[in-house]
Image (cartoon, rainbow, N blue to C red):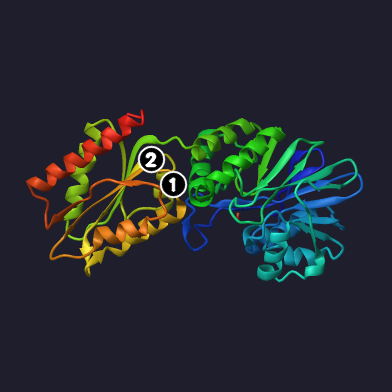
Amino acid sequence: MVLVREVGPGIQWVGAIDWDRRLFDALIPLPDGTSYNSYLVKGSEKTALIDGVDTSMVDVLLENLESLGLRKLDYIVSQHAEQDHSGAISKLAKVYPEAQILASARCMDLLVAFSLIPPDRVREVKNGEKVSLGDKTLEFIHVPWVHWPDTILTYVPESKVLFTCDFLGSHLATSDLYANDEARVYKSAKRYYAEIMMPFRTQIQKHLARVNQINPEVIAPSHGPLYRNPKFILDAYADWSSDKVKNQVVLPFVSMHGATKAMIDYFTDALISRGIFVQSYDLTKSDVGKIAESLVDAATVVVGSPTVLAGAHPAAIYVAFLANALRPKAKFASIIGSYGWGGKMPEQISQAISNLKVEVLQPVIAKGYPKEEDLKALDRLADDVASRHKGMGIL
Ligand code: FEO
């Protein structure tokens, strides 16, 4: 089956919708699938394809191009070398032997390394460089670290369409070409931001300013629907990537025999009764993407763990490691948990989140099931969190 959709005069969506993909990078759950958006831009003299699709769906892209009777392709713009965009390029390069692949220098290196593209098929495009297609122009904007060092955006000024690759995208399989259901897209885009973009918040802020300056009429990412209302996604990114945190606590925890869970439950209620929004996740049942999404805004993160084999539970270490890599903007952190005969659980968790620029509030660690004094300590920790949030003017 062929699906080609018009984005504007001379610009067509020729990508693939992956309704059934459920995992990305063997790490990130995709509850709503994704799409690999590829765009054909036809100028009066030359034709360019912007981004390919995932390796697994190259035939879908080729059939879409075939349906348009495309016999010759002048350029393949590889905005980013990751396989979900460039996996199809090696086959495309064979089908369209005259096509020159345009990419940043970093991307060229990665295309050769990962997709085994012959180096002589790739030409570097510099930041700000323009390539004419006749009555349309491709302008390239380098945006390193969204989320690899190689990424470029492509702007077609005559159409005011900005192609943004991973930046501003969402893992969402939908029949909507555009983000018509903004509430649904907001959720997917936020989760996507959390999983992929959050570690690069500072770079994101800089690149957002550049996109605002360009002021495109349409933003066309390479995953999820396009934006006819760019302000929607630009405002959302400005909020997520800002330094502002919200009156929220994220509580990822694991409990073996109920002691840590009893402490987490008590602490959750203590926070709620102090007017704090809480998101609590049992790590044996939770989706890491959802936890990542919760980390976007939260002022405080508290990890709950029992002590096992003299240290933290591996599930708690896993989430601490993940949070450490995602580098959320949280300002405070703490640890809650239990032990039987000793161990270094709190030290291990503190060490695992050493990248986070947080103040660590006094952990509460109970020997066995929490007693009266442990509950009082949890109340003190809840008071401490509330007073820090008040001090920041968010409670
Ligand atoms: Fe959509 Fe970085 O790949």
- Residue 6 lies in quadrant: top right
Judging depth in this view, the residue of 269 and 311 nearest the camera is 311
Judging depth in this view, the residue of 25 and 122 nearest the camera is 122
Q: What residue type is labelled 2?
A: Ala
Give the residue number, with chain letter if any, for mark 1: 328
Quadrant containing the C terminus is top left
- The location of residue 193, given as percent across then percent down, is 52, 46
The extreme left residue here reads 372
- The location of residue 228, given as percent across then percent down, is 66, 33
Q: In this view, does 12 lie to the left or right of 390?
A: right
State how many labels appear.
Answer: 2
Q: Is residue 343 left or right of residue 321?
A: left
Tell me the element at label 1.
Answer: loop
Q: Residue at x 27, y 38 (%)?
A: 385
Cβ of mark 1 under 8 Å from ligand 1: the answer is no
Any part of residue 216 in sight: no
Any part of residue 23 in sight: yes
Q: Residue at x 88, y 50 (%)?
A: 46
Mark nearer the N terminus (1 vs 2) = 2
Judging depth in this view, the residue of 134 and 104 nearest the camera is 104
> Marks 1 and 2: CB-CB under 8 Å?
yes
- Per the model, the C-alpha gap separating discs 1 and 2 is 8 Å
Q: In this view, does 168 lie to the left or right of 77?
A: left
Vertical position of residue 108 compared to residue 69: above or below: below
Q: What residue type is labelled 1?
A: Pro
Q: Is residue 312 left or right of residue 67?
A: left
Give the residue number, with chain letter if any, for mark 2: 298
- The location of residue 67, given as percent across then percent down, is 79, 53
**Badge 1: how crowded within 10 Å, few (<14), some, or many (20+)?**
many
